[in-house]
Amino acid sequence: MKNKNDKLAILGGEPVRKKPWPIWPRADKNTEKLLKDVLYSGRWTISGCYTGRKSYERQFAEAFAKFNNVPYCVPTANGSAALKIALEALGVGYGKEVLVPGLTWVACASSVLAVGAVPILVDIDPDSLCMSLEDARKAITKNTAAIMLVHMYCMIADIEGFLKLSAETGIPIIEDCSHVHGAIWKGQRVGTFGKIGVFSMQQSKVLTCGEGGAAITKDRKLYEKMQEFRADGRRYKEGAVKIGEMELEEIGSVQGRNYCMSEFHAAILLDRLQHLDEENKIRAKNAAYLDSLLLNIGDITPLIPSPGTDLPAYYQYCMRLNLLAFGNKTIDLIAKILTSELKILIKPVYSPLNINTLYNPLSILTALMHSQISSNLVHFELPIAQKSRYYYLTIPHGVLLENKRTFNNIIYSLNKLKNTNIESMSF
């Protein structure tokens, strides 16, 4: 090592990145204008009285449905709530099973438990990190009520294969699109292939309001059920509504809960939705450039968007490392070193649900009620998912909105790490 710039920051050297990365979430004067409009409007939620103009929640619902080229959208307080109402609308409940990928965020499994059903963890495809079609087919039983097909990072799951499986078995598909807002596959928005498409709008997502969610569908009956499930059995009134009256009418055909999105969150989403396609195009262009840089240095394989993807969406940029070329240190240590170099949070992929400390199904009473299968809720074999956890790193999507020349920071950091003997170092 010849100078301080060649020494790892974690060992007292200078970090490669000194300039701040672009701020995420983004906002502008129009975002501020809409928030102020809500603030002084006299209505902060869909369950507030009608003031004479369409709520921001309904404006966003209509805009997001149109954006995805479907007739119906139900906004929710968060992505977990969207998953729950989707499951409930499809009749998933006690005694039923739902196929869930073993590598995904814990809410996918916990939402199944929350409606009293059992998540059946399915291993992943090693190339896409999405649910394996072959393993899903093997996991189907007479109790399988739904397939939760999650599109991961920038990848699209095997839509054609799973649609064929759904047609053969009659098992509906819920697409979890929380990583791929706005992605287009073979000319169609992702989230519109299954019975219901579900989205999270949590802060880290490419379309965000801090906390929020939505479920979209082409099916009028599912739409009406989901409205009731998220608004305590109420749904939008048909026809005119007078000022000072409730815009929701009490139906009560199901036992709902309050999962409604606030007007503040809906206003932010309505504003930021108009930027989504353009931001996705910038990320896709920059990701392709970063792909080429990484492939040139070797020992790193980026996730390349699935074949047939017309417009990818990058929740996180994901890459596989040959650990031997990096001193054979763990992926967690490499993530820690790169975080210090780049001044942005670099992480491994999710921990598989069968070993994830956040997934504790036996603590939930509804799971224990299924005593004949509760002992199997954790002990699924997920060899591909577990292997992937120790070889893949993720970079936040906000990096892909930066000028692509700054990606040299990433390349320099990787080369700096690669050329440093960390074999004997302990942290």
Image: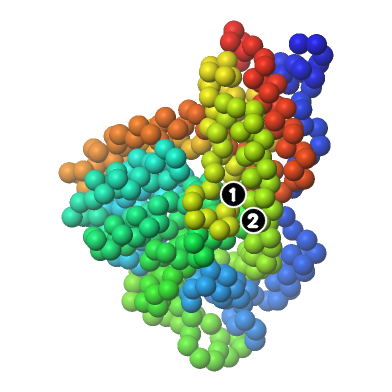
Lower position in the chain sequence, tag 2 or tag 1 = 2
- Asked whether, in this view, residue 254 is left or right of residue 405, the answer is left
Which residue: 74% across, 64% down?
31
Q: Which SS class for mark 1? A: loop
| Residue 78, image x, y percentages | 52, 58
Binning the other alpha carbons within 10 Å of mark 2 as few (below 14), some (14 to 19) or many (20 upward) gives: many
- State the residue position of label 1: 314
Q: Quadrant of residue 243?
A: bottom right
| Residue 162, image x, y percentages | 34, 56
- Asked whether, in this view, residue 197 is left or right of residue 6, the answer is left
Kindly tell me whether residue 120 is visible in this rendering. no
Question: Distance from label 2 to label 1 (Cα)?
Answer: 7 Å
Are circles 2 and 1 on residues that touch, CB within 8 Å? yes
- State the residue position of label 2: 280
Kindly tell me whether residue 135 is visible in this rendering. yes
Which residue: 72% across, 55% down?
26
Q: Which mark is residue 167?
A: none
